[in-house]
């Protein structure tokens, strides 16, 4: 799912739709966080909730899964046993520097409104990378 969002983001940027492209950063990040959580921290019961065929009941059960913040905290608790420290640090750092702006783009806040009116300056996503080299990969 994260890879699909990434591909969509690239297509939208290539077709000069930066607001929609940037809005996809949050679901892409959430999909990556969920995948990392499933790999490193989720219980068998939590994994089963997402593997169950879609129905009204399974949809309701999945609503009780952890939030992004909680998933990152659960991954942190697994560092040194099931999770590599780098996985936790990357998710935590990206969320710390990007969450407010990502929410703004998803919910038609100040970032996209100013970008649409004044032109986009994409400085905030680059802050989320540890180095400029990491952004180019």
Image (spheres, rainbow, N blue to C red):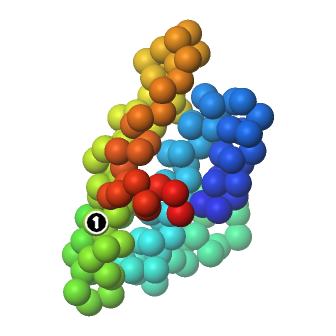
Q: Residue furthest top?
A: 117
Q: Residue furthest bottom?
A: 81
Residue shown at 35% from the left, 57% from the top = 131
**Along the line of sight, which residue is nearer the eye, 10 or 65?**
10
Residue 77 x %, y %: 22, 75
Occupied quadrant, residue 49: bottom right
Residue 7 x %, y %: 70, 54
Q: Residue furthest front?
A: 133
Is residue 114 depicted above or below 12 in this figure? Answer: above
Q: How many numbered circles does the render carry?
A: 1
Residue 69 falls left or right of residue 133? left
**Along the line of sight, which residue is nearer the eye, 84 or 46?**
84
Residue 96 x %, y %: 28, 47
Residue 132 x %, y %: 40, 54
Residue shown at 77% from the left, 34% from the top = 15
Residue 104 falls left or right of residue 1? left
**Residue denoted by label 1:** 89
Q: Quadrant of the N terminus?
A: bottom right
Would residue 67 be seen by someone viewing this image from the given angle?
Answer: no
Is residue 99 depicted above or below 95 in this figure? Answer: above
Residue shown at 45% from the left, 72% from the top = 36
**Along the line of sight, which residue is nearer the eye, 130 or 68?**
130
Occupied quadrant, residue 41: bottom left
Residue shown at 72% from the left, 30% from the top = 16
Is residue 77 depicted above or below 96 in this figure? Answer: below
Residue 13 falls left or right of residue 63? right
Q: Secondary structure at mark 1?
A: helix
Would residue 48 be seen by someone viewing this image from the given angle?
Answer: yes
Decide: few, some or many residues near mark 1? Use Cα within 10 Å; few <14, some 14-19, many ≥20. Answer: some
């Amino acid at each position: 799912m994260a890879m699909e969002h990434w591909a969509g983001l690239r297509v939208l940027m290539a077709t000069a739709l930066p607001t929609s492209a940037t809005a996809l950063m949050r679901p892409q990040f959430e999909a990556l966080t969920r995948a990392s959580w499933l790999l490193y921290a989720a219980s068998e019961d939590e994994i089963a909730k997402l593997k169950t065929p879609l129905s009204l009941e399974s949809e309701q059960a999945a609503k009780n899964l952890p939030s992004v913040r909680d998933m990152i905290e659960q991954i942190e608790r697994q560092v040194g046993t099931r999770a590599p420290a780098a996985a936790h640090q990357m998710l935590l750092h990206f969320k710390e520097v990007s969450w407010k702006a990502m929410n703004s783009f998803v919910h038609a806040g100040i970032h996209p409104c100013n970008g649409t009116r004044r032109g986009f300056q994409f400085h905030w996503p680059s802050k989320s990378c540890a180095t400029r080299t990491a952004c180019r990969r």
